[in-house]
Image (cartoon, rainbow, N blue to C red):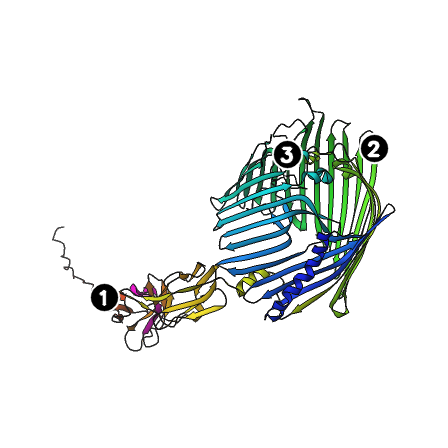
């Protein structure tokens, strides 16, 4: 029989729709919806169970209010009523300079308020049912809620069950220019201890308190482009009682990230009462973690990491102690001819102590693997060689496997398959073959798919469980007349799954015993879903719906400013200059040089001079594009400066009949070059005011000519007082003086004297 509160929940959906329908119909707005009928039937070991019902989702944009988002999902089966996700949410409602989100029903809230680069930090996302109010303004976000914690149940058609925990909480997040972010949260978790035993290990004994107060501060600071610091401090204490658990949990880390090298170190310390939500166990562990990645080239990457953790921080004698340490390293490489290769080796030590100081269970596990893949036409081929060695309380075990797979994509057909050869060496040698395959065919209105697995999975037996699998899955998706779509999937599965006592992942149990035999199943299942999409008013975007809503319901400010024309001697308004806001809005300056944009949504925008429409006589004298931040009901001012350009003209005068249009003139300091017209006139265009120097390139002067007068002109260009035009005069070079050779006549020789 249905209880009164369950019947009330079942009637909540139509009552809300009836109340809201008149307002929605009167609004000149748009929306979309999807109505689905779905069910899941499961047969296992002679037992049968089934679940079916309706799922209705809608999104409706209401003018001057916000985006109304709702879902009503309810199922029945085996004489019981099951509730899926049922919620009604008003999003992006502008009020008091904030964006408001009002939620009633089922929703999820993350406990990670700040994005941490640490991969070894786990933050659960809580599934809740109740009310939440959140608001956001620029870089600040607030939320408060009072809820019952729920857990999802069901393999394909999931529904939610309530836990004996209620949560009252509030969060705050502040970020500044992607450099500094801080998140603060406070929770009060109330547990009905009379119902806690019904949930078994979901609420461990050492975390069962009637009320626990929990608060945390998460922060991230980017000190430079490559260096980042991050951390968390959390406090937890049972209300009105004492506890052996330490109230403080502190974690901190640092990251250096560059294209060639990245390194991260962090230390995690979380007490047993760190966020004691049902179904999650994120606390009771401490230890360091380090990770390094080196990229010596674009084709090679080297990586390595190490960690060491232990639990039982409060030294509670009721739970065992677990210690684990791991190291791993490897390389990834892109090889010629389309090949890619990878190698990785991992080493893990584990020990458990139930009493005393001597370990009662200890294991040392090592695994290495090598991968090689390549693309060959429409095929992608991959091979993997893996070796696992386990040494524990039992006799040593070694498992080797060789895996080969191929994927083919041809037009609308995708085929894939693989085979793995396993060998396990312990007290005896065991060999097995594990095969799998999949296929998918896409047609215009029909999609067919299927996959299978068959074999004994020795790999799982060396890591977590021992299992034997035989599974076949087949399905079809189709577009039906009338806008309906159908999806059907059948599944057949034979599985024997049992726990491997040498599992290297036992640390995750935190002392909670697991059953030795997980399942021995002979299952079949059938899943179906028929859905139809509806729309009214106008289309809604498929992505970015919140941003689309915020743009149409802006928390607005205004942007205005002046565009000035600057010169050497004065600054004056520049009329007729076009300014652009973002991508779609433009405004031209008036006679006073002023522009204005009204009703600008709050947030980050860009304001720029529209260079395509900038008058030819202007050139920007300040940055042509500026990033601004608009605040609600405030004026954001941004001025621009432009410089008027002028021309510098002159002439070259030469003897009549001499061609001067091949002479090159040089303007410094701009380095411009030009040649004159046939009449000797020349001009340099679009010049800023200031001093310039002009001269002729002497190598381009016509033969037999020289410059008469100044060879260089220094000009001060001022648009209010134009300088006299420079004039270069050319004249013929004078004939060089010929040398005069002087010849002197010598005296006639005298005849010799007599007798000589």
- The first of marks 2 and 3 along the sequence is 3
Q: Which residue is drawn at 80% across and 30% down?
A: 426
Which residue occupies the foreground of this view, 104 or 570? 104
Q: Is residue 557 magenta?
A: no
- Calculate the distance from the C-alpha at mark 2 to the C-alpha at mark 3: 29 Å
In the image, 561: left or right of 225? left
Q: Does the magenta stretch include residue 687?
A: yes
The residue that disc 2 covers is 429
- Calculate the distance from the C-alpha at mark 2 to the C-alpha at mark 1: 114 Å
Q: Give the range drawn in magenta.
A: 675-701
The residue that disc 1 covers is 738
Which label belongs to residue 327? 3
- Calculate the distance from the C-alpha at mark 1 to the C-alpha at mark 3: 96 Å
* Front tag of 2 and 3: 3
SS category of the residue bearing label 2: strand
x and y, in percent, of residue 281 in the image: 65, 39
In the image, 747: left or right of 421? left
Please determine whether, in this image, residue 269 is positioned above or below residue 296.
Answer: above
Q: Can residue 610 be seen in this view?
A: no
* Front tag of 2 and 1: 2
SS category of the residue bearing label 3: strand
Please determine whether, in this image, residue 495 is positioned above or below residue 416.
Answer: above
């Amino acid at each position: 029989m249905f209880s009164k509160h369950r019947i009330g929940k079942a009637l909540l959906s139509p009552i809300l729709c009836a109340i809201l329908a008149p307002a929605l119909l009167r609004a000149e707005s748009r929306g979309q919806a999807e109505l689905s009928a779905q069910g899941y039937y499961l047969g296992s070991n002679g037992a049968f169970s089934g679940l079916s019902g309706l799922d209705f989702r809608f999104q409706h944009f209401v003018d001057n209010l916000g985006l109304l988002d709702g879902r009503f999902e309810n199922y029945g089966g085996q004489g019981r009523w099951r509730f899926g996700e049922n919620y009604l949410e008003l999003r992006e409602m502008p009020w008091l300079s904030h964006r408001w989100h009002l939620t009633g029903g089922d929703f999820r809230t993350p406990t990670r308020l700040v994005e941490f680069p640490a991969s070894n930090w786990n933050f659960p996302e809580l599934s809740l049912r109740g009310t939440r109010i959140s608001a956001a303004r620029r870089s600040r976000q607030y939320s408060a809620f009072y809820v019952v914690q729920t857990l999802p149940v069901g393999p394909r058609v999931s529904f939610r069950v309530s836990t004996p925990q209620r949560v009252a909480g509030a969060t705050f997040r502040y970020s500044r220019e992607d450099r500094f972010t801080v998140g603060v949260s406070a929770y009060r978790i109330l547990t009905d201890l009379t119902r806690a035993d019904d949930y078994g290990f979901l609420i461990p004994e050492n975390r069962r308190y009637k009320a626990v107060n929990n608060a945390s501060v998460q922060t991230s600071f980017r000190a430079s482009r490559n260096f980042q610091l991050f951390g968390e401090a959390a406090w937890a204490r049972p209300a009105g009682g004492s506890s052996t658990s330490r109230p403080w949990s502190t974690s901190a880390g640092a990251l250096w990230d560059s294209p060639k090298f990245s390194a991260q170190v962090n230390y995690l310390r979380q007490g047993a009462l760190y966020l004691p939500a049902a179904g999650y166990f994120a606390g009771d562990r401490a230890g360091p973690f380090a990770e390094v990645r080196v990229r010596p080239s674009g084709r090679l990457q080297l990586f390595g990491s190490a960690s060491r953790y232990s639990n039982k921080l409060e030294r509670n004698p009721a739970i065992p102690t677990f210690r684990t340490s791991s190291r791993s390293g490897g390389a990834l490489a892109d090889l010629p001819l389309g090949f890619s290769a990878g190698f990785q080796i991992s080493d893990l030590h584990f020990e458990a102590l139930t009493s005393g100081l001597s370990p009662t269970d200890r294991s040392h596990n090592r695994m290495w693997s090598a991968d090689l893949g390549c693309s060959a036409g429409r095929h992608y081929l991959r091979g993997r060689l893996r070796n696992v060695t386990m040494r524990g309380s039992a006799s040593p075990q070694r498992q080797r496997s060789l895996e080969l797979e191929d994927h083919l994509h041809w037009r609308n057909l995708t085929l894939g398959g693989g085979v793995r050869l396993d060998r396990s060496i312990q007290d005896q040698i065991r060999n097995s073959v594990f095969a799998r395959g999949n296929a998918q065919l896409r047609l215009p209105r029909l999609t067919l798919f299927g996959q299978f697995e068959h074999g004994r999975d020795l790999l799982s037996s060396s890591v977590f469980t021992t299992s034997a699998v035989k599974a076949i899955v087949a399905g079809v998706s189709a577009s039906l007349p009338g806008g309906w779509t159908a999806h059907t999937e059948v599944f057949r599965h034979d599985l024997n799954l049992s726990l491997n006592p040498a599992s290297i992942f036992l640390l995750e149990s935190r002392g909670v015993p697991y059953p030795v035999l997980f399942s021995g199943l002979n299952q079949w299942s059938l899943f179906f879903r028929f859905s139809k999409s509806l729309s009214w008013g106008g289309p809604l975007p498929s992505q970015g719906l919140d941003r689309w809503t915020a743009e149409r319901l802006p928390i607005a400010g205004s942007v205005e400013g002046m565009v000035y024309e600057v010169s050497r001697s004065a600054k004056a308004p520049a009329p007729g200059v076009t300014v652009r806001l973002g991508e779609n809005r433009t405004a031209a300056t008036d006679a006073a040089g002023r522009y204005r944009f009204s009703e600008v949504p709050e947030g980050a925008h860009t304001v720029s001079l529209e260079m395509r429409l900038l008058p030819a006589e202007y050139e920007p004298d300040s940055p042509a594009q500026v990033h601004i931040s608009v605040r609600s009901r405030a004026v954001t001012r941004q001025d621009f400066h432009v410089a008027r350009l002028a021309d510098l003209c002159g002439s070259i005068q030469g003897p009549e009949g001499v061609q001067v249009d091949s002479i090159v003139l040089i303007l410094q300091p701009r380095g411009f070059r030009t040649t004159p017209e046939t009449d000797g006139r020349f001009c340099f265009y679009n010049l800023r005011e200031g001093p310039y120097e002009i001269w002729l390139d002497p190598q381009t002067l016509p033969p037999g000519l020289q410059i008469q007068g100044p060879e260089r002109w220094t000009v001060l260009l001022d648009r209010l007082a134009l300088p006299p035009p420079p004039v270069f005069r050319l004249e013929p070079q004078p004939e060089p003086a010929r040398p005069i050779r002087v010849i002197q006549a010598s005296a006639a020789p005298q005849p010799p004297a007599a007798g000589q």
